[in-house]
């Protein structure tokens, strides 16, 4: 049986901090796409009625800093959206609050997440609706509109330049995410990162396969992460080119 993510503390934190404004809390990501892998985060989306006050934002950050990725626990990615910001759907949607440990240093310096446009919400909301895993509240389709396929496609392509800029600092995740974008554009489905990488490996030129195969193996816990013996950038550039060809501007 796939590992079940521990989410009760996150549900309690949201309900305690945001009170009756919380309309629904939903699991998505790896836990709903084939099961958690050794490096998987716990991905949670909350839909709320009212925009979060500054003091509430800071309280969420401070509590998440104590539990996310600490003492062997999994990292948490928490997104909060105001229902009126995403229903009726419009592009780009607005993310009201985002916590992810890649921003931990900023949070520890006192930076507090603020509302901002976020194309990345398009694939997140799509995964939430398809997974249909409420942790609190009604099924997500009662609170969220479906994302039009064209908006999903342009949203995932929009993130490619930022991904490429992070290749050296987050090599495994960037390679797997590029593979998933290519897979989604070509097949119309959002797959787990390892399943997307398997799909892409069958279509990669031979010289690029060892790089993506390494990223997939590390994600599955089959290999230690190292890149000193491989050159990830040509593989990443090939994946980015396939994405561009699959979604010409």
Image (cartoon, rainbow, N blue to C red):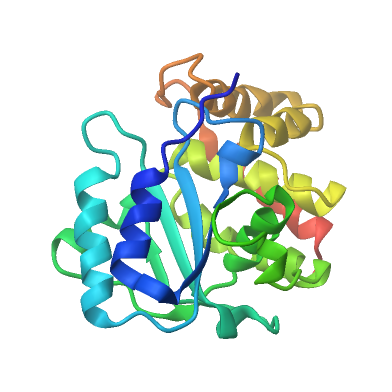
> Where residue 192 appears, x then y in whole percent?
66, 37
Q: Which residue occupies the foreground of this view, 112 or 47?
A: 47
In the picture provided, is 106 more to the left or to the right than 193? left
Most distant residue in the right direction:
187
Rendered-image quadrant of the N terminus? top right
Residue 234 in view? no
Residue 113 in view? yes
In the picture provided, is 45 more to the left or to the right than 99? right
> Where residue 185 appears, x then y in whole percent?
80, 54
Relative to 218, say whether 123 is above or below. below
In the picture provided, is 112 more to the left or to the right than 24? left
Rendered-image quadrant of the C terminus? bottom right
Look at 61% across and 29% down and name the residue there.
Answer: 212
> Where residue 200 appears, x then y in whole percent?
75, 34
Relative to 118, say whether 173 is above or below. above
Look at 81% across and 32% down and name the residue there.
Answer: 203
In the picture provided, is 11 more to the left or to the right than 239? left
Q: Which residue occupies the foreground of this view, 111 or 133?
A: 133
Relative to 35, say whether 165 is above or below. below
Q: Which residue occupies the foreground of this view, 80 or 23?
A: 23
Most distant residue in the left direction:
109
> Where residue 28 appears, x then y in whole percent?
58, 49
Q: Which residue occupies the foreground of this view, 5 or 217?
A: 5
Relative to 96, say whether 221 is above or below. above
């Amino acid at each position: 049986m796939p590992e079940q993510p521990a989410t009760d503390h996150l549900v309690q934190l949201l309900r305690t901090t945001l009170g009756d404004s919380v309309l629904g809390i939903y699991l998505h990501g790896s836990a709903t796409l084939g099961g958690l892998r050794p490096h998987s985060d716990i991905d949670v989306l909350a839909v709320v009625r009212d925009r979060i006050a500054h003091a509430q934002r800071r309280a969420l950050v401070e509590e998440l800093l104590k539990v996310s990725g600490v003492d062997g626990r999994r990292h948490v990615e928490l997104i909060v959206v105001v229902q009126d910001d995403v229903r009726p759907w419009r592009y780009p949607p607005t993310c009201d609050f985002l916590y992810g440990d890649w921003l931990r240093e900023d949070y520890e310096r006192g930076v507090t997440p603020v509302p901002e446009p976020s194309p990345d919400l398009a694939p997140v909301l799509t995964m939430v609706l398809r997974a249909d895993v409420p942790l609190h509240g009604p099924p997500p389709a009662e609170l969220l509109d479906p994302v039009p396929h064209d908006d999903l496609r342009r949203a995932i392509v929009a993130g490619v330049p930022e991904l490429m800029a992070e290749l050296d600092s987050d090599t495994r995740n960037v390679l797997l995410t590029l593979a998933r974008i290519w897979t989604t554009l070509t097949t119309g489905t959002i797959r787990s990162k390892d399943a997307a990488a398997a799909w892409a490996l069958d279509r990669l030129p031979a010289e690029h396969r060892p790089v993506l195969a390494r990223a997939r193996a590390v994600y599955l816990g089959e290999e230690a992460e190292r890149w000193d013996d491989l050159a990830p950038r040509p593989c990443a550039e090939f994946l980015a080119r396939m994405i561009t060809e699959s979604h010409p501007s």
